[in-house]
Amino acid sequence: MKDGAPTITTDGTGLRVAVVAASWHQQVMDGLLDGARRGLADAGVTSVDVVRVPGTFELPVACASLAQHYDALVALGVVIRGGTPHFDYVCQAATVGITDVSVRTATPIGFGVLTCDDEAQALDRAGLPGSAEDKGHEAASAAVATVVALRGVPTP
């Protein structure tokens, strides 16, 4: 675990969660998806659906379609910097789009989108054996913890 990262332990028993995962960079995505599944299992979440989309750019529209049907979502993707501005456009679109869906629908979305300079950075964050971080697990844990935290707040 990275220094400064919180350890989140939450009981998500009974929650319905969908994991929306991009398909590019299969090894990284497999690690992120496995991490998210472990994070949800650690929280006691047993109702989990996985939806695969082509890439990170497609995550917001998938999240928008699913938000009203689940207690939380986990968005997983990876964008690796290349030689064109494509990286900046995809990263911004995914971040703004996922944020908009979450705020507009009041559905917590764990943000597990890696934005890396190279594949080595992505692999180091993917939760694979030897990785320094497990961003899929972190994103799933954050989504569940947010649902639980909001359930304890009275609404006007």
Image: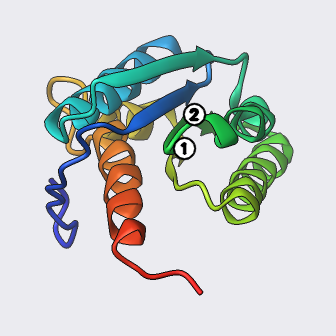
Horizontal relation, residue 26 to residue 102: left or right: left
Rendered image: mark on residue 54: none
Which residue occupies 66% across, 42% down? 67
Horizontal relation, residue 137 to residue 112: left or right: left
Horizontal relation, residue 124 to residue 53: left or right: left
Q: Mark 1 is on which residue type?
A: Val
Residue 17 in which image quadrant: top left
Residue 143 position in % (x across, y down): 41, 52
Residue 137 visible in rendering: yes
Horizontal relation, residue 81 to residue 92: left or right: left
Which residue occupies 15% across, 53% down? 1
Question: Which one is nearer the viewer's eye here, 151 or 96?
Answer: 151
Mark 1 secondary-structure assignment: strand
**Inter-mark Cα distance, 2 to 1:** 4 Å
Task: Say above or below: 86 vs 88.
Answer: above
Residue 152 in which image quadrant: bottom left
Task: Say above or below: 131 vs 113.
Answer: above
Residue under label 2: 77
Question: Which one is nearer the viewer's eye here, 67 or 27?
Answer: 67
Which residue occupies 77% across, 56% down? 92
Question: Which one is nearer the viewer's eye here, 63 or 44?
Answer: 44
Residue under label 1: 113
Mark 2 secondary-structure assignment: strand
Which residue occupies 14% across, 56% down? 9
Q: Mark 2 is on which residue type?
A: Gly
Task: Say above or below: 41 vs 89.
Answer: above
Question: Which one is nearer the viewer's eye here, 29 or 50?
Answer: 50
Is the Cβ of the residue at disc 2 closer than 8 Å to that at disc 1? yes
Residue 75 position in % (x across, y down): 55, 39
Dot 2, crowdedness within 10 Å: few (<14), some or many (≥20)?
Answer: many
